[in-house]
Image (tube, coloured by chain):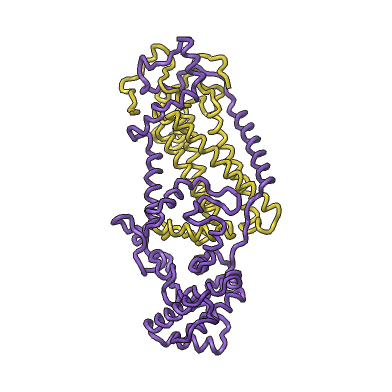
Chain colours: A purple, B yellow
Amino acid sequence: MTTSTTSSTHGKRYTPDSHSFPTRPYDLVKEMVIAGVVLLLLTLALAASFGSLDEKAITLQDWAKAAPNDVVATAVGELAGTTDSSGYGPPYNTASEGQKLGPLALQKWGGVRIPVNSAQDLVLTPLEAAPADTALKDALGTWQSANADQQTAWATAYGDALGATPDGNPADVATGDYGPVPVMASSFLTLAQSGGLEQLISPNFYGGDRTKQLLLLADGSYLEEQARARSLGGDQWGMMNEAGNYPGQVWLGLMTFWYQIPAIGGSENGDALVWAATAVIVLGFLFLPFIPGVRAIPEKIPVYKLVWRDYYRRNKTKR
Amino acid sequence: MSAVADTAPARAVPAASAPSPDRTSWTAWARYRITHTVPEGQWLPDRQPSYVASWIYVFGMATLVSLFIVIGSGVVLALGGSEWWHTSGVGHFFNSTHLWSVEIFFAVMAIHLWGKFWMAAWRGGRSLTWMTGMIALLAAVGTGFTGYLSQTNFDAQWIGAQAKDGLNSVGLGAWFNALNPAAALTLHIVVLPLAVGVIVIMHVILVRRHGVVPPIGAVPLIGAVPPIGAQEPTS
C-alpha cells in the first residue's frame, strides 16, 4: 500500500473520492450510543443543577396595580393616537409606512394583515363591554358624539397635562378642557385593576392570539422597565440574554451585535438594517463554497493540519 | 482516535454501472432512486477512510443525538400542554431538560460547523452538503425562537414585543405574528421541527453519499490520476 500527499502532484485543489482511500474500523453506532448517553447525562445534570427560568407573565391587572399612572397615560395615548401601536403602520394600520431598507418599503409591502385600531380595539371596545356606571356611560356617549378632531384634541390635551405632573398622577392634573377623557381613563384603570381587561379586549373563550393585549402592554413603559432591569434591552444584548444567569438565545449573537452599533441600533430603520446585515452574512455562509477568496480561507489559515495531523504525519513518513 | 490497520479501499459499486430502472414503473424508479442515492454499503459503514481520526468528527454525531434529546424532551412537554410546566414540578424539570438540551444542541452544532469550515468540507462536490447544514442551522434557530415565544411567561411577552419590530420591519410580521403564542407554538412543535428533520435527513444522506471529505492536498494512491476537469476553483 503506497499513499502520498499530493501537493507536488496535483496541488491542493483536487479532491479525490473519499471511497478510494485506505480504511480503518469505525463504529458509528457505538459512537452514537456513547454520545447519546454522555449528552443525555450532561443534559439531565444541567437541568437538575440549574433548572430553567419561569417568571410569570405580567397581566394587565399586575400592570394596573404596579404602575397605575402608566396605564392611564397609555390609555390616553391610545385615544390621542400617540402610542407606538397607533402610529405603527403595517401590519397593524396605515398610520405610517414603517421602516425602509433604502428605497425598499418592505414593511409597507407586507401589508396590513393584522388590523388593529388602537383607540377602538385597546380602549373603547373593553370600556363599552364593561359594566358601565352612569359616569362612564355619559363619557362614552360624549366621546362618540364628538368628531375625530375634537376627540384627538381632548385626549392630547389630557395626555400633555398628565405629562406635566411630576409622576403622571391624574390627581395632580391641572384643570382644562379634556372632555370625557379623564372619566374614560379612570374607568379603564379600574377595569384593568379588576382583572378582566384581557378578556374584554379579545372576547374569545380559548384565548390564543394575544396580539392586542401585548400591543397595549408594550405601548406602556412598565414592560420595558421590567425588561431593562433584567438586562434584556435591545442595547443590552437583550436578544441573546436571559434574565438572571440563565443562557438565552446565544445563537442570535450575530444579529444582536448590530443593535450595539449606535448608527444602526439608533436609526429609525434600525430593525430593517439589522435584518439586512444579518441576511448578508447568513447568505455569505450559505453560499460560501461559491465565493472566491472566502472559500480559500481554510487553506490560507491551516487549522486543517490539526484536524488531519495524524494523516499528514503518517503519509510524510511513508513518503 | 489513532489510525489503525489500514486496509485497501473498499470501493462502492458505482451507481452508473447498475441497471437503470424500468421507465414504466414508478415503483421501480423509486426503488432505484432510494437504493442508488447512497452507494451500497455506505448507509451504515463499519469502516471509514483512515484520515477520519480526530475528535472533531464526533461533533457531527453529537449534533444528531442532541437533536434527538431535544425532540424527546419536547415530546414530553407537548404531552403536558403549553402551560403544564408552569404548575408542575415534573413539567418544569422537563422544560429545564428541553432548555439545556437545546443549548447543548446549538453548542455542538456550532463546533461541528466551524470544524467543517476549517476543513473546507464543501470540497469534492459537497457544496450541497454544506448548504443543507446551514439551512438546518437556520431552521433550528427559527425553531428555538418560536419556542421562546410560546413559553407563556414574561420572557415570551418581552421577546414577542421586541421581535415583532424586527419581523415587521422587513414585511415578515404580516405573515408571522410574534404576538400570537398559539401560532408560535404550532410552528414550534410541528412545522419547524418537521423542516429541521427533513433537512437533517437530507444532510445525512449527502454525507453518506459523498463520504467524509479527504484532507486538503491528499490523493489516495499514486497513479490515481484525477479525471479531466477535476481541478476545483477554491481560490
**Residue A126 x, y percent position in the rendering:** 53, 77
Assign the C terminus of chain B to one quadrant of the image: top left
Asked if residue A133 is positioned above or below residue B67 in the image, the reply reads: below
Q: How many marks?
A: 0
Residue drawn at 52 percent across, 67 percent down: A217
Viewer-nearest residue: A98 or B27: A98
Residue farthest to the right? Answer: B89
Viewer-nearest residue: B17 or B51: B51
Q: Left of A13 or right of it: where is A239?
A: right
Give residue A116's quadrant in the image: bottom left
> Is residue B185 among what the camera can see?
no
Asked if residue A42 is positioned above or below residue B99 in the image, the reply reads: above
Residue drawn at 55 percent across, 52 percent down: B147
**Residue B120 x, y percent position in the rendering:** 42, 29
Residue drawn at 59 percent across, 37 percent down: B65
Asked if residue B210 is positioned above or below residue B86 in the image, the reply reads: above
**Residue A58 x, y percent position in the rendering:** 59, 65
> Is residue A317 among what the camera can see?
yes
Assign the N terminus of chain B to one quadrant of the image: top right
Residue drawn at 59 percent across, 45 percent down: B71
Residue farthest to the front? Answer: A166
**Residue B50 x, y percent position in the rendering:** 52, 19
